[in-house]
Amino acid sequence: MRRPALRALAALAAAVAVVPLVLGGAAPATADTAPPAEGAWFGPDLDWGSDGPDGYADRLGETPSTYSVNIDYPIDDDSADQWRRSARAAAAQGAALVVSLEPSRPLADLDADQAARADELLTEFHDQYGIAQLVRFAPEMNGNWQRWGQQPTEFVRAFGQIADAVHDGTSTADMVWAPSYGAGYPFAQADGRLPATGARDEALLDTDGDGTVTEADDPYGPYYPGDDAVDWVGLTMFFFGKGDASTAAGTDVPLVANQAPAEGEVQARFDETWGYSQPQEATFYDRFAVGTDHPLLLDTGALYDQGLDGATELAVKQGWWRQMLTALDDQPLVAGVTWLETVREEAEAGDREVDWRATDDDAVAAAFRADLVDSGAIVFGPLTDPVTPEEGDAATVQVRDGGGGDEMGWIVGCAVALALAFLLSGVVGRVLPRWRYPDDGKPGRDLRIDLFRGFIILAVVITHIEVAGPYSFVTLKAVGAITGAEMFVFLSGLVLGMVYPLGVKKFGEKTAAIGAFVRARKQYVVTLVVILVVFALSFVPLVNTDEITTFTDRGTGDTGAGAMGRVYDLYPNADRLLDYPPPWYAVRQLLLLEMGPWPFNIMGLFVVLSLTIPGLMWLVKRGLWWVVLVGSWAVYAVGVLFPDFSLLPSQFEPVFPLFAWQVLFTHGLVIGNYRRQIVSALTTTVGKVLVGVGVVGYAGFLALIWAGSTYGFDLGPIPSSIYDSLYLTGYQRVDMQWGRLVDTALVVVCVYAILTVFWKPIAAALGWLWIPLGQASLYVFIWQVFFALAVASIPGLDRTNVITGTIIHTAVILLVWWMVRKRFLFSVIPR
């Protein structure tokens, strides 16, 4: 038996996919994925309260193509959150999600509004994650053990409501009708016998017209919602390990020993011969899969009681799955298989806890994987483009928003403005020497650097508290040459390069090194604490942690504008940390900083860079600064040549790749250590000329190519197209391209010169605020996470309101200034 319609659909999908390839590019896989033309999708039906996709994939050693989750219906806030977490986790592996909507109310109480709400979530998750979804409404409806069981009239009505909503919507989800295997129907010996069925339903269920509902009646047909409502059919087929076909159904037969399945049992069930006392006119497969040309989703598993003797766990479960895999050859319309992966109490086992899992035991998991792969019948994932936490981290890149799309134009404008201010400082320095910074030449803090750090850290805080206003315009829109991040990293290295030698001189090299490691450890511990505190706050009502624990793609990540609107979970498997004991993969993700709030992701970079300080400064102290810089550029070159390689899986790597961003820090260390010598050299006549030529020449070159592009005049030997490609080839922030490095040097030189000459008026106006914040910049950076969270939790906040945004930013700035002045928790939080 073949499946012609499915093959035609697959061929059409393949033809559609080929067109973009021919025209110049392959489109990414989407949620509109047809069932496989050959083989079957496979995935687990997980206990999401104690397990997750990452853990399952690690145990299996393969990526499943589906995951299944049970969701209470109608959808309330808790079930919506569970569905959302499951969708995110499945999308991270590019898997489809099989959503079993389990009615928590009588079927008669379900209405179209509730169906519309379910479709809203299906559409939301489709649009945000690009995930394929199968909706399995009220499965096993022919069983009397379900609350919604054996009520064909209301079931068909409720199924049709959801099917109409889904089919009229844009989620591309498919509806699955999934009864239980019919042997033993109407299941008089099954657990949870329902009250007597109403007269109308009794008439529907009495398919042979003998006046009673017995095993002679059709266990499937009365519950079928119709071809228009159903996209897939499903069948539940579990092995309870109770012996032959005549005793396997029901609770009156005790489970006294683990037994391997009888030879041919799975195929006998497909043939509708196993467990029936009367022959069936046709099989479920022929009636509802072949007869309607619908793909079939098989829900299966094998029970094992760890407290009983008998067959081994491998013999029981492998005996079942091998039969299942063999049966797929003769039932080619089986397009999906879900395996029950849980431990739970079962009435058929005397209400004892039994194990359905195929991956908990290493030997069983290895055999399961080998048989799945060797069968050639299973299609593994991913089915769609995985929506990974790494993509989410990369998407958190915040770029300057000029409103007009000419990013390079703003960089040019900033460079020209800095060059003009630099030239002006030379004039003012001669005319008003009393404004100059009173540099006494002694080692120690430089208030010019502290003041500049204060401005930079405030820019970071304002940028992360995303409300409209003049502050946001300055930090995110108007400042073109740099962002706060690169200057924050460079200045951190600069200050450490200045103060570390003082520690060596005062306490000795060994003690200073130990102090640096202690500081790095403190940074790491505080980082873990912040991550866990934010996670804990996610359980507090009215605290909107989603604003910082998830990220909505703005088209700025590696996936480009096409991913705009996609939502990423930045706390992968955080829920698993609540398990006892927590699984290692979740603990590993925490310890390696693979999870955390997005405004805080650069903190991992600082932890790693802080660990390098003693070794780098040991070299610098011995005059081997050139070794440090050569090594730094070699590491940078590795990052350029192998951009996909990263040393750590940490959250900061996709946004602030270590191999690229370390070059700012190491140069800051060296410059900080030799600051006096460098300043003396650059303030000589020759030094001033060279710096002036560099600043004006660079700004002039940018202005020239901008003007050539804007007004269309000939630039001589300079290609006319250089301006159009310059931003993408030289000024990408994530990779810290050459233009960003030059801009960083430009800003440092110009700002230092401007602050030197205009020190007194600038310090009088802004020093009271910026200097103390700059001296405690790391402290401020840590607190900004909670400021961003507090603002996000304001009910009804209009982020576009300029007045509201200005008030919020002002309040946050004054609050953090007050906290610094009062030294609030200075003994706990690093500065």
Image (tube, rainbow, N blue to C red):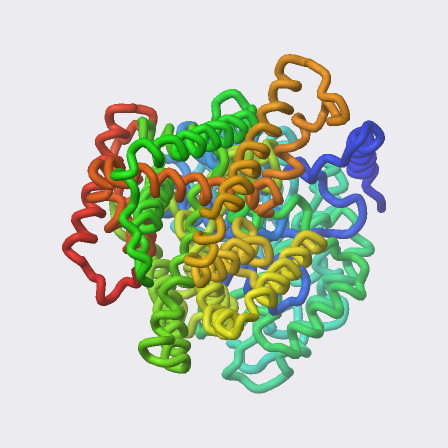
Viewport quadrant of the C terminus = bottom left
For this orientation, the residue located farthest to the left is: 822
Going by the image, does 354 lie left or right of 751?
Answer: right
Identify which residue is drawn at 33% across, 28% down: 468
Name above or below for residue 626 compared with residue 226.
below
Which residue is painted at 72% across and 35% down in the image? 27
At 76% from the left and 46% from the top, the residue drawn is 333
In this view of the protein, which residue sits in the foreground, 265 or 675? Answer: 675
Which residue is at the front of the view, 126 or 106? 126
Tell me if 32 is positioned left or right of 25 in this view.
left
Counting from the top left corner in percent of width and height, residue 320 is at: 69, 68
Residue 799: percent from the left, percent from the top? 32, 29
Q: Nearer the viewer, residue 500 or 679?
A: 679
Residue located farthest toward the bottom when viewing the structure as drawn? 309
Q: Quadrant of residue 60?
A: bottom right
Q: Position of residue 561 (x, y in %)?
A: 59, 32
The answer to whether residue 585 shows anywhere in this view is: yes
In this rendering, position of residue 420 left or right of residue 694: left
